[in-house]
Amino acid sequence: MFSRITPTGVAWPDGSSLDVEVILWCTGFRHALDHLAPLRLRNSRGGITMTGRLLTQVAGQPAVHLLGYGSSASTIGANRASRAAVVELMNYLEGRAA
């Protein structure tokens, strides 16, 4: 398991790192976002502004989606939102490859 998120990817405790474009993080049933603090996702009021088709994408961060957060915080909502997030992430990655 990596120990931190870097500007270009992730790093492990031994100092090794890997550049990544997307992290799919499936964590359970509580929204605990403190580990994402280095990404500075919070707005001036302390919340996280969501966008995207089903409001899973963090505004201004097309590679960061929070599933099970906000309007997708139910079993049905998370299921639908997960499918939409995968499509949005695939479009994001395809656009970066162009």
Image: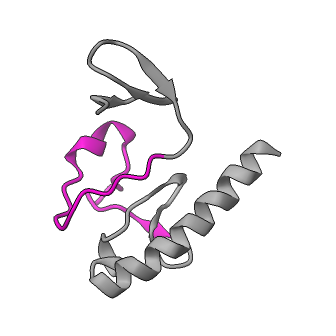
Residue extending furthest toward the bottom = 76
Residue at image x 56%, y 77%?
A: 53
Total tally of numbered discs in the picture: 0
Is any atom of residue 7 visible in this view?
no
Does residue 48 lie above or below 4 as drawn? below
Quadrant containing the N terminus in the rendered view: top left
Q: Main secondary structure of the magenta part?
A: loop
**Residue 42 placement (x, y as % from top left):** 33, 53
Q: Quadrant of residue 73?
A: bottom left
Instruction: Tell me: residue 34, above or below residue 45.
Output: above
Position of residue 32 measured from the top left corner of the image (x, y, whole percent): 19, 55
Above or below: residue 28 compared with residue 93: below
- Residue 57 drawn in magenta: no
Which residue is painted at 61% across and 68% down in the image? 87
Specify the segment rendered in magenta. Answer: 23-51
Position of 65 compared to 15: left or right? right
Camera-side residue of 31 and 37: 31
Name the residue located 50 percent from the left edge and 60 percent from the top edge.
59
Residue beneath the point at 43% across and 20% down: 17
Residue 39, magenta (yes or no):
yes
Residue that lies at the very extreme toward the top in this rendered image: 15
